Amino acid sequence: MNNKKTLTSTFFGILMAGLLVGIGFLLADINIPRYLIAILIVSYFLNLACGFIILVSKVRTDTVKACWLFVIILLPIVGLILFFFFGVIPFKKKDYNEYENVFGNVDIKDVEESKKIIKNETKWNAYKLNFNTMHSPIYTDTKIDIIKNNNDILKQYIDLVRSAKETIYIQTYVIKKSVFFYTLANEMAKKAKQGVKVYFVYDWAGSYRKFNSKVIRMLDKAGVHVAVFNYNRWIPIKSSINFRSHQKMLIVDSKVCFYGSSNITEEYLQINTNRNIFFDINYIITGKIINSLIDTFIYNFKKYTNASEEVKKQLKFRKAIENKDNGSSTQLVLGYPDCKYDNINFSVLSIINTAKKSITIVNPFLLPTNEIVQALKIAAWRGVKIKIILPHRNSDKNYSLLINRYLYADWIKNNIEVYEFNMFVHTKFIIADEELCFFGSSNLDHRSLMINFENSILFKDKEFAGELKDIYDSYEKYSLKVDKAFIKKYVPLRKRVGHQLLQIYKPLV
């Protein structure tokens, strides 16, 4: 059925249901207090107004519209309150030219070089897609080393901070009471006292009440420019908290970047067995792609943090150091809810639709958009070999397994191989045809693809793809294959009922 017709029918369903309930009360001749009648009438018309706003919205997908319409039908008064706090979009979607403000320091020479690369790239259209819609340049001098062992994360991170001579830019989603955070805080303070300009951004919602505020005051006193993304001091529950910065990066002296998906918490270090252990990989990146990462850091810092205007003015762009050209095309892809296009979602779709031989996916969360679900099934029908690894254990979110297992029956029915790694895997990458890699902060769920501020990297390099494939193979050795017996054991009927509810509410998860 046409989505618009379905949504319109749902809206008029709200209208008719309210009228029928009202008529029913009148015919029943029930003695209802006038104040209660007034509340019901006001609630009814507010529901209608809210439903109309949702229906005509141009900045929400049909899936999101259907979700909110269902919420206000099921919970007439509570649904309105939930929509006010979580459904209102706190900024207007800009057209694609807003990305010009993100990549505002791109060299004209790099723009022209990007056009040549696109012209010569006959297969992977994702590069052209992102260049045309978000002006993201393509570089061919990138060098990337993979941090495969979680035990090396803390050492590599701190060593980079200690090596800084001029600037340190750090952005993360979660900071938590941990050896990682306290060690990093001490090193940042030392560097700031030595005259290094240190800028540190964490997300308000992701880090809420997870750390000791005394540490932040210590950093401020030492001269570290600490800023909070999407800061909400007085109203902790409002719609803006739904739009979070899930990005993670450390950039030192515009020369090198620690990049990936690990937050500044203890779970990633595998040193505390009392907590859930996260298996993750990260990357050390050099080359001109750091220009794009610096641009995004500056854009986030100046537009969405609580830093003072004076501090924001001090933050200046410094050009990255160029490596020797190696022919490996690299492009930063942003998924920002304040811009017109959902480029991470589009890029994943483009990769799936272009792949001819194989698609390999590792991700902790897999509840993607309907378009990606269909694209994967069509790719499998075309003969593309698709293999997916997800975690067998919950993260700190107890519903994560429920999310992932929703589509298992559909996946295996369509010859898509699915495995569950024995621990919680937080690694996030896609490999297509053993040459194109897509990795970064983004999960493959609706929140990361459509709501959060995310960034990921497109990197075409067969040797690098081989390294990621080796990591995939190492995970598969310790994984359970999903088949009918697995589904019968781990996805009983009561959980399938939860899956159906989850399908309705997945845009809000």
Image (cartoon, helix red, strand yellow):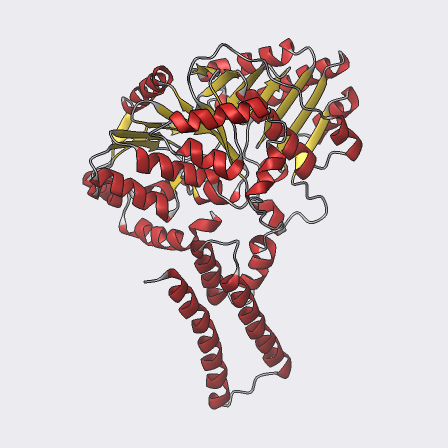
Q: Is residue 336 visible?
A: yes
Left or right of residue 201: residue 130: left
Residue at image position (40%, 55%) is 504
Quarter containing the N terminus: bottom left
- The image shows residue 65 at horizontal and vertical percentages of 47, 58
Where is 345 relative to 433, above or below? below
> Quarter-wise, where is residue 462 in the image?
top left
Near-viewer residue (306 or 364): 306
Foreground: 384 or 113? 113
Is 287 above or below relative to 131? Answer: above
Residue 119, image x, y percentages: 41, 28
Would residue 123 appear left or right of 272 to someone viewing this image?
Answer: left
Q: Is residue 265 visible?
A: no
Pinpoint residue 199: horizontal percent, then vertical percent.
69, 24
Between residue 105 and residue 414, name the one nearer to us: 105
Residue 474, placed above or below residue 6: above
For image coordinates 63% across by 83% down, the residue present is 34
375 left or right, relative to 54: left
Residue found at x 59% / y 21%? 250
Image point (63%, 9%), residue name = 163
| Number of numbered markers | 0
User: Residue 329 at x, y = what percent?
Assistant: 43, 22
